[in-house]
Image: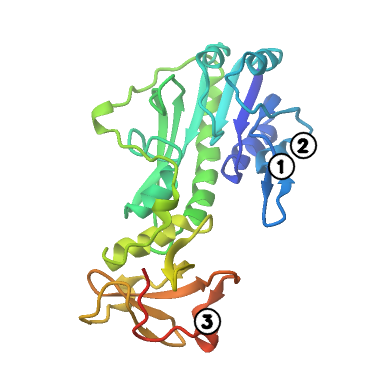
Amino acid sequence: MNIVFMGTPAFAVPSLDMLVAEGYNIVAVVTQPDRPQGRKKVLTPTPVKEAALRHGIPVLQPERLRKPEAVEELSKYKPDMIVTAAYGQILPKSVLDMPPLGCLNVHGSLLPKYRGGAPIQRSIINGEKVTGITLMYMAEGLDTGDMIARVEVPIQDDDTAGTMFEKLSIAGAALLKEQLPRLTEGKVQAEPQNDEESTYAPNLTREDEKIDWRRTSQEIYNQIRGLVPFSGGFTLWNGEVFKVWSAANPANTGSASSQAAPGTVLELTETGVVVKTGDGSLTLLTVQPSGKKAMDASQFVRGTSMTAGTVLA
């Protein structure tokens, strides 16, 4: 049986590694094109491409999978099944109809909740306590296909998008491994999604990264966790971007009482930078002033011109 695997970020690598380790015939891997990374804009392969090359699997990197020439190239591999995990492009009908055993997707949420491109980040930002993996057949809609199996994964109070990506990538590979034996025998009965229960998790924008200090301490804490390690949250200090990479859990630290406006720096200590929020305060632990590297608040406090009374916008 010929399997084509489609994926791009590190989230997809455990699933690909599992398929290889279990002896499945992976005839090709499809991933996003190499992109410039870092300040020097070095052209960098995707984590899935690196894994595929390590396993000696041919790699396809179409800019747009829906282009006829990309579909034609893929068809040469005669896939019996396509398995995707965070590939990053919507599969056209011509590809969905290609493999007789269907196209499977390892999705990082408990569908029908959090359909879309950023389910893990938005689950944390929204304060969810549980998320999970859904193994599903792919359909023309966005994450609307029938569900084959699901597994729950708790979100701990100190989890970030990064830690949850790792946990869910492992859970996804395990669920795929568990279900594949019966799936390779033919299409199985799967449960249709209830569209009335669906919610969406669109890709994050710059606006999602901006901290609104009028919100509650817990909401801001969740926002920061949901953006780490990819972008971090940010506010403005003296008109320049001031990034926040971690904060103390307000549920454990308590909250300072003050009549100051939200965004006001209440105190700078060796522990962190205490900022007024809509319902109390939040202690920032890891920050990054414009033009500098991220640093612990203790290091920042020793050399900063920021003072109590400074207002972050």
Q: Using the image as rendered, state which of residue 225 and residue 261 is in the foreground.
A: 261
Looking at numbered disc 3 in the image, what kind of residue is underneath it? Phe
Residue under the image location 24 percent in, 79 percent down:
260
Q: Are marks 1 and 3 in contact (CB under 8 Å)?
A: no
SS label for mark 1: loop
> Considering only order in the chain, which callout, 2 or 1, is on the residue closer to the N terminus?
1
Image quadrant holding the N terminus, namely: top right
Near mark 1 (Cα within 10 A), the count class, few <14, some 14-19 or many ≥20, is some
Residue under the image location 55 percent in, 24 percent down:
181
Q: Using the image as rendered, state which of residue 10 and residue 299 is in the foreground.
A: 299
> Considering only order in the chain, which callout, 3 or 1, is on the residue closer to the N terminus?
1
Residue 73 screen position, x and y as percent: 70, 16
Q: Are marks 1 and 2 in contact (CB under 8 Å)?
A: yes
Q: Which residue is mark 3?
A: 300
Q: Of the residues tagged 3 and 2, which is closer to the observer?
A: 3
Position of 267 relative to 278 (above/below): below
**Rendered image: mark on residue 45:** 1
Looking at numbered disc 1 in the image, what kind of residue is underneath it? Pro
**Rendered image: mark on residue 53:** 2
